[in-house]
Amino acid sequence: MDPSLSEFWVAVAVACFCGAAIGVERQLRGKPAGIRTSMLICLGTMVFVSLGRDVVSPTGDGTRVLGQVVTGVGFIGAGVMLAREGLIRGVTSASVIWILAAIGALAGFGRHWAAIAVALVVLAVLSGVQYLEHVIVHLKPGDYDNNSNGQDPDEG
């Protein structure tokens, strides 16, 4: 965690880039956790994991930070989930927050290419699955669907 080293700035750039890429997708869809939030989750996780990685002592275990980040981010994700009219909303946004922290952790551990690869997979899932949901006629929407009335949009 030395800002005078290029490795620090590479990790910051990777965390911010991955968070921004996913955040743009979320923001364009009008979902919680847009660009700024996504970048900050990735960056914050990267910082905490980097600090934990740098802690080396006979009585401490720096990897415990990672476990605490996973738990803490779960609380943030729970905050975006809502129960409305018997339906739970925001589960995908909560999942995105969780994977953003995982991407930040990869950057914090110096696994930059893995962080970028996971971010690309997340983007493919977020946009690709929605495309499939609209294309495949026999795929019936359930309570998870974006429609507030739970009805198939093609069944006027």
Image (spheres, rainbow, N blue to C red):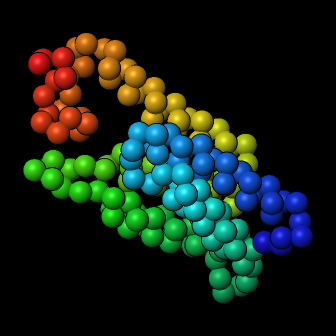
Q: Could you say which is closer to the camera, residue 155 or residue 70?
A: 155
Q: Determine the image quadrant of residue 116.
A: top right
Quarter placement of the C terminus? top left
Q: Determine the image quadrant of residue 153.
A: top left
On the image, the x and y values in percent for residue 12 come to 73, 59
Count the marks. Answer: 0
Q: Residue furthest bottom?
A: 59
Q: Is residue 79 visible?
A: yes
Q: Horizontal placement of 54 versus 117: left or right?
A: right
Q: Horizontal placement of 125 versus 91: left or right?
A: right
Task: Give the answer, above or below, for where 104 lies relative to 134.
Answer: below
Task: Give the answer, above or below, for where 88 lies relative to 78.
Answer: above
On the image, the x and y values in percent for residue 135 come to 34, 15
What residue is at 66 percent from the left and 86 percent from the top?
A: 59
Task: Give the answer, above or below, for where 121 lies relative to 92.
Answer: above
Q: Horizontal placement of 141 versus 41: left or right?
A: left
Quarter placement of the N terminus? bottom right
Q: Is residue 115 visible?
A: no
On the image, the x and y values in percent for residue 31 come to 39, 47
Q: Horizontal placement of 8 versus 152: left or right?
A: right
What residue is at 80 percent from the left and 63 percent from the top?
A: 8
What residue is at 80 percent from the left and 55 percent from the top?
A: 10
Task: Give the answer, above or below, for where 117 lies relative to 14.
Answer: above
What residue is at 18 percent from the left and 17 percent from the top?
A: 154
On the image, the x and y values in percent for residue 87 come to 15, 47
Q: Could you say which is closer to the camera, residue 118 or residue 20?
A: 20
